[in-house]
Amino acid sequence: MNDSKTSEFVEVGTINDFPKGNGKRVMVDGHAVAIFERSGSYYAVEDSCSHQHAQLAHSAIEKDGYDLSITCPRHGARFDLKTGRTLSLPAYRGIRKWNLKIENGKVLVDRKPMVDAAQEILRLEVESR
Amino acid sequence: MPNQILDLELDQYKYGFRDPEEYLYRSEKGLSAKIVEEISERKNEPIWMLDFRLKALDWFNRKPMPKWGPDLSGVNFDDLTYYIKPQEHGERSWDDVPDGIRNTFERLGVPEAERKYLAGIGAQYESEVVYHNLKEEWEQKGVIFLDTDTALKDHPDLFRKFFSTIIPSGDNKFAALNSAVWSGGSFIYVPPGVQVDIPLQTYFRINAEKMGQFERTLIIVDEGAFVHYVEGCTAPTYSASSLHSAVVEIIALPGARVRYTTIQNWANNVYNLVTKRAVAYKDATVEWVDCNLGSKLTMKYPSVYLLGEGAHAETLSVAYAGRGQHTEAGAKCIHAAPHTTSTITSKSISQYDGRTSYRGLIEILPGARKAKSSVVCDALILDPEARSDTYPYSYIDESDVEIGHEASVSKISDDQLFYLMSRGISEVEALSLIVRGFIDPVAKELPMEFAVELNHLIELQMEGSVG
Amino acid sequence: MHTTVVKEIQPRVYEIKNNTGLDWDAAAAGLLSERLGEPPNLRSQRFERLHQLSKVPTPHRFMESWRRTDPAIISQKRFKLWNPEDEILSETSTHDSDRSESPPVLTSAILSLCNAQQQSIVVEENAEDSGLVLASQDHAFRTQDTMSEFNSLIGRDIEEDDTPAFGLMNAVWYHGGYLLAVPRGSQILDPIWIRHRVNTPGHALMVQNNIKIGSESSLTVVIETESGGEIENYLNEITNIDLEPGAELSLIVINTGTSNSRYYSHLNVGQSESSNFEITWVDASEGWNVMRREVNLNGPYAEAFFRGMRIGSGEGSLELRTKQNHFAPATSSDLFYKSALFDNSSSIFRGLIRVEPEAAGTNAYQLNRNLLMDEGTKADAIPNLEILVDDVRCTHGVSTGKVNKDALFYMMSRGLNHSQAVNMLVSGFLTEAVDGLAEEDLKDYLFAKIEEGLSKFLGGKSVE
């Protein structure tokens, strides 16, 4: 888990640098990170599909109720934008997620990624039983 | 050469009768957003499904044709009909099924099979399931066995949760096509712990000339449950090429076991380009039993993603290719968890200028300790012009594993034939016996009536050839 | 006892000074050609190939065939070409240590090369009398005495399926190599020994070798290649082999390389009627290796045998790509490849048996076994079959796993300690691959190489 005491945020740009409703790649400590904006909220996930490493920053954001997802442009694997969890094969694992905050119009990303989703396999279960 | 004297007609299509075409609705040829919207509207689908179909159409338009493997240049997407609906609703009783359709099934022997053994039959005629008969017993246990269109209406939440999670539209060009225009197929849900010990079955046929058939099957087997699903296909012969492109998704939850059996006997002008994939969670087992006879070109690689510890995958396949046919059948197993195991047994027979190919993949991902995989591919070549290929890929990223692969290619030896003939067996019978013996490891895994049908199909062809 | 030496050229010892290198361009191709003293037709052929090279795709790791070995490692961007002008003769021997060590068996000839240039050559009298031709290319072109033998071979097109780029690069910028020919009807009993030391720090070296065995002649050739030094170097080597009807060639290949060695090797054999080709190899390179070994059985009754073993260590990777192409009836081929992998080493085997419609009565086999000794090791196998005729007997098999626990337990119950038992199992596993070699003394030499390669892993391990 990410310990806030050890968090160290770095600036990756101002909110004007990130197009509304879209994604854009930035580098954080040598990692390619895709920053997405949707309705005023920002999300930072690994810019590499866990299936065959295609870039994700150009994915369209899809909304379903409260859930937001992105779809890999190569084979259609889907990821939960808020958690990085995988939602469909062929990505059997999720992608890393970074904590992000906005301060005075600046977009700040935690240097340390959260790897939980990247280690979690596709979760499918029947809920109502 | 004995087999030249005999001129075996293994590839003659004997189920090639046809009914006059009578349909309620038939879409225009070619594929467009308008057709997709019409299909969705006629089916009265929720808006999310229309949205899903349109996005899939976009994928289909953007995705290139596969460049590897068999020749797909004969597939003409503009010359196909994408939707045909034979009648209004799925029928529950055999007597309600229209005569024309019933006659087709009578000729295929479905009712006999039913009378003899079967608990449930879903018969798919053209694009939709027209006939469903599910034993009350299973309904009481909460088993859902419906055509996929009805399942979308009756179980919207369950459906949406699992639909397209195993095979997304963008997976490949043909999965995208299916996602855009799918119609019919089976939906199965088996609740935790329920053992469905008599197979669930669907027969279906392609009938209209140049029509595409795009079933969509989704099977969810809950924890500790078991089901055996059987799909049998026969189709009449036509001159114009037809396209069949199904998508089958299976989810085997922890401790579940699912077996999916196919006997495919498409007419020799059908392109059969199918995406079949399953996931197996902790201690779950997925078994594909796949018998491929007929079609102009088949490309089919049933896959299992072993995602939970102790999950097991088993694939058994028989492929036959005769005149002008190319059958490319294979299997894939992706080991993503420790102690996962997989076995693949492939038997293929090629005759005349027919070509069979095995194309398979074993992937062992880092951390899948103690994974075991064993692959055996055997090919029989009956004529000098026939061809057999074996393309087994294995990518192993873990050191604590046991991997084995074996393959052999051979012809029927004259010694074997002479031995049998010296025992008073005719050449035809001798050949038939050898071929049967060759496919026996797979045939014996079929339900009895299907093993009989498979052998019967082969014998039918042999009889006809020698007259 | 050795017979009288009739031809001995004084050893030339090279010292490597600061190499500025050559760019991958037409000027470099011209310079290399001129330096070898090539005839104009071969020079213009280099320029044709350069034109072809500009039209083929650059291999990259998103191609299925390069999925497991990154071809960017030997990209033209990472290396300049080795400039022979920068190599100077030195009075003091700096790296000719292997010269002091004579081969373990009687030889008909010994050729030592350094960076594709001839260092020394010794040819025994009876081999010379039999008409043996052995020279480095630079020497042969200068003396003009052996060229006619190789006209059909030098610069020959090599088919390279999806990625012709590496073969074309070699054809444009080859630097030299050796020529070996035996006329028809000669039996040279003792092996020819070729030693090639390659160290071109930070640079790429393209080498082309040609071997031609005349009708009804037989020959054994041992090739020892040692590559790499302190700094990354790239060796691209193509070996063309032609066997005339009834010719027999047994090739023994020993490859060692440091972790800095980048070695792309392509061996292409054309076989006429009733010819017999055998290759036996021991590979212990710690570097990056892609080895293509292809036989074309063009005449009836031709036979080819591949027997190889590999000890993988460090970060070493070796991708072996083999082709057994059967074009004629009643041909046979057999491949047996074993690897034992330690540390973080990896092995990739891509094999193809292709039997054409004309090749009825063919037998073809392929077997690959891998032992994964350490946690970081991995082994991929893609053994393909394409069979276009019915009258064949064709099998392949692959197995990958760890040391058999039952066998280990059995041996320890017989009084061996753990490391002795492992040592015995692994060396037994590997030596089986080269056991089929007929020459006993050479086999012993290879066994010793295997033991030597294994000793650093198994010898030192304490009893557990």
Image: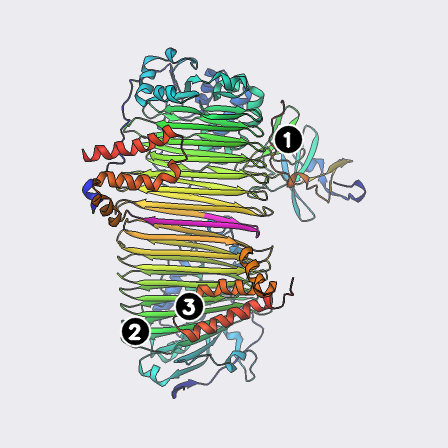
Q: Residue furthest front?
A: C414
Secondary structure under the numbered disc 1 in the rendered image: loop
Q: Which residues are magenta?
A: B393-411
Of all chains, the one bearing label 2 is C
Is residue B88 shown in magenta?
no
Secondary structure under the numbered disc 3 in the rendered image: strand
Residue B222 screen position, x and y as percent: 57, 28
Q: Nearer the viewer, mark 2 or mark 3?
A: 2
> Mark 2 = which residue?
C217
Residue A81 screen position, x and y as percent: 65, 33
**What is the image's colouring?**
rainbow
Query: Relative to A74, is C142 on the left or the right?
Result: left
Of all chains, the one bearing label 3 is C
Q: Amino acid at mark 1?
A: Gly
Q: CA distance from mark 2 to mark 3?
A: 23 Å
Q: Amino acid at mark 3?
A: Gln
Q: Residue furthest bottom?
A: C4
Is residue B396 shown in magenta?
yes
- Measured along the vertical axis of the image, is residue B156 above or below residue B452? above
Q: Nearer the viewer, mark 3 or mark 1?
A: 3
